[in-house]
Image: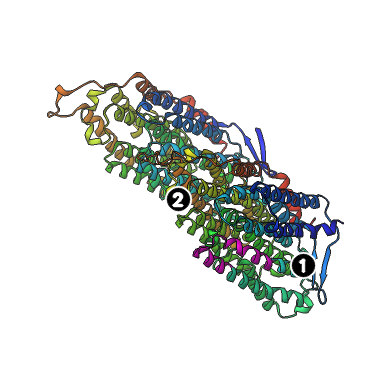
Amino acid sequence: MYLLFNLTENLPILFKVDAMSIIFAAVTIIIFLGSGIFSLEYMKHEQKKKRFYVFYLLAFLVLMGLCFAGNLITFYLFFEMLTLASTPLVLHSGSREANMAGLKYLFYSLCGAYMALFGLYFVSKYGNTLTFSEGGVINQELAAGHTGLLLVAAFVMILGFSVKAGMFPMHAWLSAAHPVAPAPASAVLSAVIVKAGVLGIIRVIYYIFGAAFLKGTWVQTAFMVLTLITIFMGSMLAYREPVLKKRLAYSTVSQVSYILFGLSAMDMNSVTGGVLHVIAHGFIKAALFLCAGAIIYMTGKTKVEELKGIGKEMPLLMWCYTIVSLGLIGIPPTGGFISKWYLAMGSLETGIPGFSWIGPVVLLVSALLTAGYLLPITIQGFFPGADYDYKALKKKEPSALMTVPVLILTVLTVFMGLFPGQLISWIQQAVTKLI
Amino acid sequence: MREIMMFIVILLPVVTGIVIPFLPFKKRKHMEIFLESFVILNSLLVFWLLMNRPAEPFTLAKFTGDLTITFKLDGMGMVFSGLVSALWPLATLYAFEYMTKEEHEKIFFTFYTMTFGVTLGIALAGNMLTMYFFYELLTLVTVPLVMHTLTREAILASRKYLYYSLGGAAFAFIGLIFIVIYGNTTDFILGGVLNLDKIGGRTDVLLLIYVMAFMGFGVKAAICPFNSWLPDAGVAPTPVTALLHAVAVVKAGAFAILRLTYYSFGTEFLKGTWAQNVVMVIVMFTIVYGCSRAVKETHIKRRLAYSTISNLSYILFGAVIMTPLGMMGALTHMVFHAVMKICSFFCAGAIMHQTDKHYVHELDGLGYQMPGVFAIFTISAFGLMGVPGFAGFISKWNLAGAAVESGNPLAYAGIVCLLISALLTAIYMLTIVVRAFFPEKSFDNSKIKEYRDPNWKMMVPLSIFAILILIFGLYSGPIVDFLTDVANGLY
């Protein structure tokens, strides 16, 4: 543990490294690096590059602080900073739409942060400490007789952090804010910054209140219901969305709730699945957004229906797109398959009446919808049909600065699906202590 | 000697103010130097007093019985007098620059400086009568400041201010009478002075009187529904709005309520009664109401005035929790909010002074022309929102901590109000910041090319306040410890 300084007597700003920090930090670093390289090319057609990089790097710094935060107050500090540092990324283009989306993002996120703060006030009274400890910090003696109050506090905190993760009913900002940012920023927003909310919920459930305290309570049930609604609703909205980047944003709404569902089940395997999906979804969503960005950069096309024959124009990029799409649907051998397998298995093992089988059903239906909203682009892209004008076809493969990051993310996704053994056992080791 | 000094620091600014119109200054600069040196001198005297606290009270005049004009420097008086003495020289410096565009400067500075003395009078008052006396006086010396521009708007605003304040004082007077009758003394003693034997079965009557006196003093602290004078009074020159209507006058109201609650009626008598619930509900409502109006308001100064209304009720929320921790939270927010709000008001004033723009929608792109002012405005915005690392976080933490500790379910609802208000604060402050720094793409900045940051007389106070916001946010230990001691009656 490293104590930076004391904000007040009992509010230390301190940092600590545990398994969760390492996983989230690793995902963050890889994706920021990839998007950063991608942006070198992409930002050529945007203005105010310096301003963009200031806030891009600032967001990176704040995320590192978030990953290594050792107690709740430090976490809250960086959580709020993250909102403030990432809003300029959304505002960047300066269009009216972007300004509106930026403010929406800002105020939704702050609303979430303040809900988290509400719980924080109570934790500071009923907890032994604010430092993250496996199994929770709630003082049983102090909490006796106040269980109802603490459950409310826990629920409000979970709901607060879930705003950042785009969970229903506070998801409306996500589909507005992520698509208007420049593509490298959309990639980190959708792949990493939403995960800050996930990390917050992991910390609250497993390191502050403790799974034992929340298991079987109304908080767990309500949280589970909300995640399942979000999974289904996000997929449906993505399925109906004609603009590619927006479709991907809705897909994020749905996919991040897969993770939250895993956390809400509070089962060994489901949590393992959730953490695996953090990694898999991070790589996949970053790759997808970078693909969408490359398409915009090279052709200016944003709508799905305009993308006929895109696979002929940029085959390498669209191959990557197809492979990671399969990953998001959950087809082996990709990372997405592994994480969803554990999620479904964990859900079945919880033994919570009803939810243990509703969960996997929703996951499957959503997987079907995922295929429905991602694969048509591949199909139309590579098989544009007989009326496609092959003579007008020009190769538009983007430069290596754009393709290589996407390629690396794709390889990582597949690699994770092929050789998950080490990773899984390591995560399980960490998760065992939490349940 | 030290006892008399308490009276001198009150008298000195009043005299300085009165003589200004009669002194033949050759240049404006001479007046500035004269005035600034006396204000600084007075502040130094106050700080000297704080270091060498007089043990005995000083009685200036004796009316019948135990009705006296008495000065005493106790913990709360130290906080308030220290606060205004620290802010006044800086505000005066700022006013020199700001008033170059206004007329009748001498009259303005006369009353502006007199107000310093009168505010110190409230801070140093040793009993209810003295405080009441200076409280009325404060209304009278500040009316000319509101009226200053002599526009129709200003005259109407000052009339409203006068009626509201005097009406409030009348209710406060009822409280004073009942303290005289049912108290052992009218002196301020932490824990209250009520004589339970004398009260007998009339508890409910006294509680009703408490609520009335609370509302009476609450007029100056702009509780809902007596708040409408404050945004209107924003027609006054910015140094007045910033220092008087964000700190001195309105905090005198909050100060008086703290005195009334903790030092006259006593928390033991009030805690857990219906009176506490009534005032707490009023305060909670004002917190949310002020913020919502601020979001709706597009005039910058009026927006900040509504923000003040809400933030004053933060202080009162701490006060009506009626525990030492609550009082500590109230005092913390009193000090921290003073710095944050004066900072944001001065930024607004600087914008108006440099560009003549008064509305939020006129601020597009100005952040690049006046980077200093808008950077400092952003800091004050983060402070008011309560971002960790800035002053507002600490005071809200203390307030909410007190509310949690009190175990009162109504206070839990108060925390929710605080957080709703924090969100609304973010909305009304950050929309300004976003406008200034992120104008829309189509925005043409050729029209605002000539605007610049103001000169050092404005930038120095602004920078000091911005630094203070950060210092309070990152290293609040000593000051919070001191305020805790004050709330526990160690001074």
Q: Residue at x 18, y 23 (%)?
A: A393
Magenta span: chief secondary structure: helix
Magenta stretch: give its range: B135-161
Q: Residue B40 placed where, x, y %?
A: 73, 48
Q: Chain of mark 2?
A: B
Image quarter hosting the C terminus of chain B: bottom right
User: Horizontally, is B138 left or right of B49 in the view?
Assistant: left
Q: Chain of mark 1?
A: B
Residue B396 on image: x %, y %? 61, 51
Residue A25 is one of the magenta-drawn residues: no
Find residue B360 and name its label: 2
Front tag of 1 and 2 = 2
Q: Which is more toward the observer, B200 or A99?
A: A99
Give residue B142's quadrant in the image. Answer: bottom right
Assign a secondary structure to mark 2: helix
Q: Relative to B83, say whether A391 is above or below.
A: above
Q: Is residue A328 left or right of residue B204?
A: left
Q: Position of residue A172 (x, y in %)?
A: 38, 47
Q: Residues within 10 Å of mark 1 (few under 14, many from 20)?
A: many
Q: Which residue is mark 1?
A: B127
Query: Could one spot residue A205 in this view of the protein?
Result: no
Relative placement, left or right, of B395 versus A268 is right
Are the residues under badges 1 and 2 in a single subunit?
yes
> For the residue marked with disc 1, what is the amino acid?
Asn
Q: Nearer the viewer, residue B462 or A312?
A: B462
CB within 8 Å, label 1 to label 2: no
The residue closer to the viewer here, B415 or B250, is B250
x, y percent for residue B359: 45, 52
> In the figure, is residue A141 to the left or right of A414?
right
Rounded to the nearest whole Å, what is the CA distance between mark 1 and mark 2?
Answer: 44 Å
